[in-house]
Amino acid sequence: MPDMNRLAQIITKIIDFFYPPFRKLMSEQLFRYAACGGGNMLLDWVLYFLIYNFVIGHDLIYINFSPFTTNLCLTPHIATLCIVFPITLLTGFWLQKYVTFTASQLNGWRQLSRYIFIVAINLAVNYFGLKLCVEIFSWYPTPSKMLITLITVAISYLGQKYYTFRVEKND
């Protein structure tokens, strides 16, 4: 397994290389957040597209928990969300912890639990947004997912900056 701190340093240097033209528009932390979040969002969209179109295959997914219960049926767009979500949860946490919000001294498990809380809010927005866009408005799933992701960016940044990775002030 590669040295994760070294990988974080390399990613940070690459992101910081592109920062100077944006210096007057945003802080370095916001730029790193945008780059990491944008990269993770792109990963999310690509995985969503590939899994929806080539793994799930637009089919309903039936899950049988036991012979004594009825099957759980997931629509293809929700099943895809369930597959992609844990992957981008972990990559997003790692990028934000080791590249963007490096000054936070909170315990790593505390950060992770807080991160999961903020992501759970975003997951709910994603779930209900997909239900609304795909099942009520009859929009295509991938563009619907893209639109909803853009909405969750603001929720995520504020939650991560002021809650998940907040910097404790020593008065």
Image: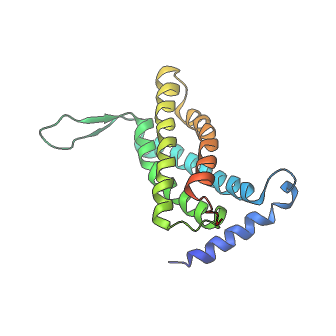
Q: Check the image and name the residue furthest to the front.
A: 171
Corner quadrant of residue 4: bottom right
Give the position of the C terminus as an image quadrant.
Answer: bottom right
Q: Check the image and name the residue furthest to the left.
A: 68
In the image, 8 versus 73, the foreground residue is 8
Please give the count of numbered marks on the rendered protein. 0
In the image, 26 versus 148, the foreground residue is 26
Residue pictured at 81% horizontal, 60% vertical: 19
- Colour scheme of the rendered structure: rainbow
Residue pictured at 45% horizontal, 64% vertical: 109
Residue 131 is left or right of residue 42, and the answer is left
* Residue 105, horizontal then vertical, whole percent: 58, 68
Residue pictured at 78% horizontal, 56% vertical: 27
Residue pictured at 40% horizontal, 41% vertical: 79
* Residue 101, horizontal then vertical, whole percent: 64, 62
Against 134, residue 78 (above or below) is below
Residue 66 is left or right of residue 161, and the answer is left
* Residue 93, horizontal then vertical, whole percent: 54, 59
Residue 152 is left or right of residue 130, and the answer is right
Against 31, residue 78 (above or below) is above
* Residue 13, horizontal then vertical, whole percent: 74, 70
Against 87, residue 45 (above or below) is above
